Image (spheres, rainbow, N blue to C red):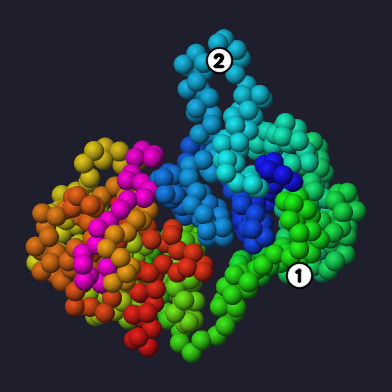
Amino acid sequence: MGNKQKYIFVTGGVLSGVGKGITAASIGAVLQAKGVKVSIQKCDPYLNVDAGLLNPAEHGECYVTKDGAETDLDLGHYERFLDIELTQRNATLAGRLLSNLIADERAGKFHGKTVQLVPHLTGAIQNAIHDAAEGGKVHIVEIGGTVGDYESLSFVEAIREFSQSVGRANCLFVHVVYVPFLGTSKEFKTKPAQNALSDLRGFGIMPDAVMIRTDDPAPQSVAEKISLFSGVPIQHTQLLPNIDTVYEVPINLAKNGFYDLLAEFAGVRGPADLSKWQTIVNEHRSEHKKTVTIGLVAKYIDNVDTYYSVVEAIKAASWHEKVDFNIVWINAETAKKKDFDAVDALLVPGGFGARGSEGKIAAARYALDSGKPYLGICLGLQVAVIAAARKGGLKKANSHEFDPGSPQVVYIMNGQEGKESTGGTLRLGDYTAVLKKGSKVAKTYGALEQVERHRHRYEVNQQYLEAIENGGVVVSGTSPDGSLVEYVEASDHPYFVATQSHPEFRSRPDRAHPLFVGLIKAAKRTI
Ligand code: GLN
């Protein structure tokens, strides 16, 4: 294929939430396994400028990139599957593009022209794709939502125009459809998928391949029917039933005719080496002697997507430590001592707002007193220092966020006042921390400096360090100038470690994060 940039567009039909993101990431993983350099991008048609202010209970976690972009959780799938670090360029939102367009219009940049969805928004989408594609040989673009949604029309039109301008042969269109199983008549129903494919054709896009998502394995006749009605060759339809681990999807995609299409498109020959994924799947399926039970003390316990990366990081660390794991969700608003007693380790993940804060402080205090392994992430560090300060005699210690009138052992950062409900104003993205020599944190990382991603507004108030230390917790890592506390730990404790950062975003399925490994290791020792 020479050096020509190629593009794969992943769209969805019938309904959203059936694994388009995992499919897009897995296609990338298969190409990588063949030595092809890939890049990837998510286009979201909704009108938010970023995912920072979206309710995590509805939308899932906000994934933060190294440059501090607050993005959709699909970016997390991409980073875990492809082991590349993405940036704001890889997350394109209609809200962001529109707000830029309108700012340009106000600045007179259109010289009196009428500003329209076509060609201006569609042009901006195409520019965003070109920008994100820089550097990859194959660039994968996932379009959020489903084709035919009112709000995604501009994106579908933009990719159609895009394929015209870069050449149709340089583009591969993959449509992911869902095929329901009807319990009453005991049959798979392909009609919604047929309609979804005809919708796509109606917008001028003839797909090259169809991914057929089903809950249970479907017979080949389902693929045949979809092939017949859509005109997509049978060998380019791929049945993708639910599986127990998403990390098997690259293996499944590399098996059939779809792989041949992909390889030909990317200009590579022969099978891909999927051994990395096979190892992960084997880890996932192997049973171990020990099961570690982790208590996740959190507020949004109804939607596991809210803590997706934390769960993935626990998985990777358990595989690394060769133990089975069990996650128990402890509701921070109702948490009792018996809930903490029942688990082998406690983890307090990131969070915002006062609701449930006392339960999280109680979890940290319990871990401090009992010697139960504890990992605090972001808010989990803040509640750890509050618990320690209270234990150290400062009975009313609290965070400005929960109780502005209290001794604020966690206070608002310089320049952050008044920005509490505005988007994009937190301390975001990569920051370096300097770790104290000989500390648990330094030993766990095996380093004296560490870069992690951040997303927070409040920080530890070092005026109160005495009380915090009296409670048994010391600072073990700070920003290079010493002004911000980045890590704390309890000295006389098997594992009580907390970080102001979000280490879960840097965990990979085949490269567990040291802080999570530390937690699992410590918990393993107790059982
Ligand atoms: N709410 C806290 C802050 O803003 C913690 C944020 C988080 O856990 N991501 O500092």
Give residue 207's position: percent from left, percent from top: 79, 46
Query: Is the CB–ligand 1 distance for label 1 below 8 Å?
Result: no
The residue lying at 50 percent from left, 27 percent from top is: 100
Secondary structure at numbered mark 2? loop
The residue lying at 56 percent from left, 76 percent from top is: 284
Report the number of numbered marks: 2
Secondary structure at numbered mark 1? loop
Q: 189 or 212: which is nearer to us?
A: 212
Report the mark closest to the observer, 1 or 2.
2
Give residue 5's position: percent from left, percent from top: 67, 42
Answer whether residue 357 is visible to the viewer in this image: no
Disc 1, disc 2: CB below 8 Å?
Answer: no
The residue lying at 52 percent from left, 16 percent from top is: 109
Q: Is residue 435 magenta?
A: yes
Answer whether residue 474 is visible to the viewer in this image: yes
Give residue 370's position: percent from left, percent from top: 24, 80
Quarter location, residue 413? top left
Residues in magenta, as a range: 422-442
Q: 301 or 166: which is nearer to us?
A: 166
Residue 391 vertical placement versus 410 (above, below): below
Q: Earlier in the sequence, mark 1 or mark 2?
A: 2
Toward the top, the furthest residue is 112
Query: Is the CB–ligand 1 distance for label 2 below 8 Å?
Result: no
Quarter location, residue 298? bottom left
Q: Mark 1 sits on what residue?
A: 217
Left or right: residue 305 compared with residue 125: left
Q: 514 or 76: which is nearer to us?
A: 514
Q: 305 or 520: which is nearer to us?
A: 520
Residue type indicated by callout 1? Pro
Q: Mark 2 sits on what residue?
A: 110
